[in-house]
Amino acid sequence: MINIIIAFFLLFAFTDSFAVTITFDGIANGVSSFNYDADGDGQSDANFSKIGGGTFSFGGPGTNVLYVSQPGLTGNSVSGNDVRVDFPNGAKQTLGFGFARSISCGSFSVGYSATAEAAELQIYDSSNTLLGTVSAVPTCTATPSGKSSFVEAQISTTFSGTAAYALVDFQGSSAYILDNFLGTFGSVEIAAAAQPPQPVPTLSEWAMIIMASLMGLFAFMRLRRN
């Protein structure tokens, strides 16, 4: 009986996900670009480049933050956009990342917002048409160790169409770190995401199926006893 119930629940516990998360573990200090092969086919699927000169570095907020971890793309903010991300195979559905700014939370309480140091993500297709834009303001967050060391935030958005590139503007003047960049942009992931969705029972439908199966099984056992 228990095995039957477990088998039914396993059917709907598994869900497909085509998103890729880049943690920048392979970044080197002093580079101005970073290329990432999402699916191991030898072709770059996301190309990060620094806008406005200068290089990325290993500096960062340490460990007492929620949305980033070192290494990441760390640099000094410039006027206008700071980072460009190109997608040779295109990007679909969603993009996002975590970030922190070099503003200490030492003298601020949890919930303090550095409104002048917001980050903005802009997404464009190959015709330079804006597909979506979203921004987030970094705050002093509550972490397992107490208050975050620096203001931070997570930014994400969904969009329609195929993105060719994205721009990130770290507003204000403090240094930034960008990490855990998430999206659907690998050639394998793009092909999988393009497949038409297959209808599957919802959780409530599965619950009804399980209930009906159990009722039938109990009725059968009772008839055998009689």
Image: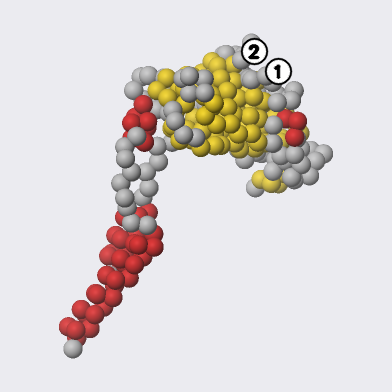
Residue sitting at the far right:
107
Q: Is residue 205 left or right of residue 59?
A: left
Element type where label 2 sits in the image = loop
Q: Quadrant of the N terminus?
A: bottom left
All told, the count of numbered labels is 2
In this rendering, would 100 be left or right of 200? right
Residue drawn at the location 74% of the way across and 25% of the way down = 172
**Residue occupied by mark 1:** 79
Q: Which residue is drawn at 24% across and 80% down?
A: 219
Observer-nearest of 86 and 196: 196
Location of residue 102 in the rendering, given as x and y in whole percent from the top left corner: 72, 28
Residue 65, image x, y percentages? 65, 38
Dot 1 surroundings within 10 Å: few (below 14), some, or many (20 or more)?
Answer: few
Tell me: residue 81, above or below residue 116. Answer: above
Give the distance between the C-alpha atoms of the residues marked 1 and 2, in whole angstroms: 8 Å
Q: Whole-percent x and y of residue 170?
A: 67, 25
Location of residue 223 (image quadrant):
bottom left
Mark 1 vs 2, N-terminal side: 2
What mark, if any, has residue 52 been given in the picture?
Answer: 2
User: Is residue 219 placed above or below 104 in the rendered structure?
Assistant: below
Give the colour scheme of this rendering: secondary structure
- Residue at the spot x=31%, y=67% of the render? 210
Along the line of sight, the residue nearer the viewer: 159 or 83:
159
For numbered disc 1, what is the local secondary structure? loop
